[in-house]
Amino acid sequence: MSLNSKIPLTMLKEGDEGVVIDIIGGRGAISKLLALGIVPGKKVKVLGNRGGAILISINGSKFVIGRGLAMKVIVHAKQKN
Amino acid sequence: MKIAMVGNPNVGKTALLNLLTGGKFEVGNFPGTTVEKKEGKTKIDGKDVIFVDLPGIYSLEAYSLDEKVAKDFLTNENPDLILNVVNASNLERNLYLTLQLVDFKIPMILVLNMIDEAEKRGIKVDAEKLSKILGIPVVRTVAVKGIGIKELKREILKGGSVPRVRVGKDLKSKLEMAEKIVKEVVKVEKKRVDLTEVFDEVFMDRHLGIPIFIAFMWMMFTFTYTVASPLTNLIDFVFSTLSERISSMNGVVFNLIGKGIIKGVGSVLVFLPNITFLFIVLALLELSGYMPRAVYLMDRIMTAFGLTGRSVIPLIMGFGCNVPAVMATRTIEDDKVRIATILVNPFISCSARLPIYVLFAGIFFPTIGSAVIMGLYAFGVAVALISALIFRRVLLRGEAEYVIELPPYRIPNWKNVWILTWNRTKHFLQKAGTVILAMSIVIWFLTNFPTSSIDKSYAGMLGRLLQPLFAPMGWDWQFVLAILMGFVAKEVVVETLGILNTPIAKIMTMPQALAFMVFSLLYMPCLATLATIKAETGWKWTIFSVIYSFVIAYVLALTVEVVARLI
């Protein structure tokens, strides 16, 4: 995975980390995510990605995000060591 | 003094309200909505105080109904004070709402709740500094243990203060501000092993997660049916005794009260223990924090049918009774998914339909009876899921966007379990007292006039009248009447055939019986379920539900009859 890849959250695998860089979509979707602290600049870790909803940890909280909504969260994938 | 309680979901607002009011609060709805409103009156040092607990929200953008209701309340009802309840372990996100509340220029007190949980996680919040920055009193509490309540009451009497913090109106500056404040007031020490992490390792495991979920569901069923059954029997006994005693007295009025009202309402009230017990388990699942985990585990399977993980529990509950199952869809945020889940729920075979299968399978399939019954259950699930897919592709299109927080696991507080359970059970009782009461009288009339022998009554005439409609399946009028009566409650199908002394084995063939079971499984939600569907979705979808399920039942029953005859 290259350092600068801008990919939807759904493309991260279980255990991968990244940084939120953008949220695309309508105002409803954006505000829903922002209110939960899913905000550009935050580090995000994918705890589960098994084909349906995505399980993430961000800011010390865990969230289940429906796949459709997770597609709208654009992240920088962090390169694995 | 009117006080609004505002905060994120899962911050312990209800527990706090419970403490502040000494448990004296009422649960209702905000006018014209299904949004829950908890209101309690009390005296603090002789001063009258009204607490209104607004729905748990993350922001005041007014995108969801809960947010809109909260915003309208703060704008129009002029509360004297806002108690902003925040979760100490998650200050940054909670502060986002706090900084939105600042815009209302209403005196505020910040309640820093669950400090014990935060400390366990190694999170320390400097309350004094936070109070200075925001310019409002900050009180540290542990609501479930009653810690900090005295201080909170003292601050309430002082009336709080209008926040002095200066923050821009836009989303972004509030978020930046929240981040800045947290950097100043929160210290995270090295945390000890977090039990939530340990539990999640097990409950969310790739291989064990789903089996554990199934085990929980099995426990739920055992609890709601086996454990509740003595109570069910008791209620059944009381109502049938009462019904017989009263109806044995002379006079048509006694007959109406005994055989009509008491018997009819009683036949629905026997479900009360099951429903209450089911709601207790549901409350436990919700309050313990397990529910969102189950949503995640089942999401992939449900997405394949156009639903989301949110639909799983309502669907499983349908095996017990569709009434609480339909009510349980309230946890689904997405309206389209919610309606689809409601509409397909009646296809999940509830416990009331089991006696029908037992009766017919016993007569026509003496050796493979249980396999036939299992097959019917599976058939119901298949029809439900395929219907859901069709609805979501045709009538209720649109992507379901949802995000749910996974709270840490908590041991539920019994008072809260009871509040949730009672509030939901109450709706069921209200229905039994209104719609079902009225229908009981109608049915009593139809079966008792012009003569009290059922086959010569209006109901009997109706059965004969409608029989041609079901002639393709080859059913006699008794079966048609049974189906008609079964609309009130599906167990009445068996009861009616009993009253009519129907010689089932003589006047029905095996394919006809199979078709009859399929039809009984699918044909129409029972009265109580329909009343619930109406309350949750309105008339349009209720009528749709009746027509759709009837057509599906008719087509599939006929197909089954023809296919079974050819084999």
Image: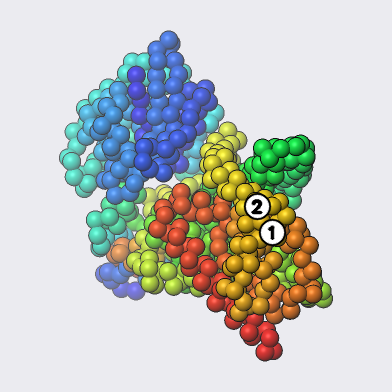
In front of the other: B144 or B185? B144
Q: Residue furthest right?
A: B367
Q: Find residue B279 and report its horizontal and vertical position in percent.
A: 59, 46
Q: Which residue is denoted by mark 1 in the rendering?
A: B456
Q: Which mark is residue B111?
A: none
Which of the 4 image quarters holds residue B365? bottom right
In the picture, measured across the screen, residue B104 lies left or right of residue B526, that is: left
Q: Which residue is denoted by mark 2 in the rendering?
A: B450
| Within-10-Å neighbours for mark 1: few <14, some 14–19, many 20+ | some
Chain letter of disc 2?
B
Looking at marks 2 and 1 on the same chain, the residue that comes earlier in the sequence is marked by 2
In the picture, measured across the screen, residue B533 lies left or right of residue B365, that is: left
Q: Residue at x 28, y 38 (%)?
A: B71
Q: Residue furthest bottom?
A: B566
**Secondary structure type for disc 1:** helix
Q: Amino acid at mark 2?
A: Pro
The N terminus of chain B: image quadrant:
top left
Which of the 4 image quarters holds residue B88? top left
Q: Amino acid at mark 1?
A: Lys
**Secondary structure type for disc 2:** loop
Q: Residue at x 63, y 58 (%)?
A: B459
Q: Are marks 2 and 1 in contact (CB under 8 Å)?
A: yes
| Within-10-Å neighbours for mark 2: few <14, some 14–19, many 20+ | few
Q: Is residue B563 above or below residue B184?
A: below
* Circle count: 2
Query: Do circles 2 and 1 both sit on a common chain?
Result: yes
Q: Is residue B456 above or below residue B550?
A: above
In the picture, measured across the screen, residue B312 lies left or right of residue A30, that is: right
Q: Residue at x 74, y 40 (%)?
A: B247
Chain letter of disc 1?
B
Which of the 4 image quarters holds residue B154? top left
Q: Is residue B337 above or below residue B189?
A: below
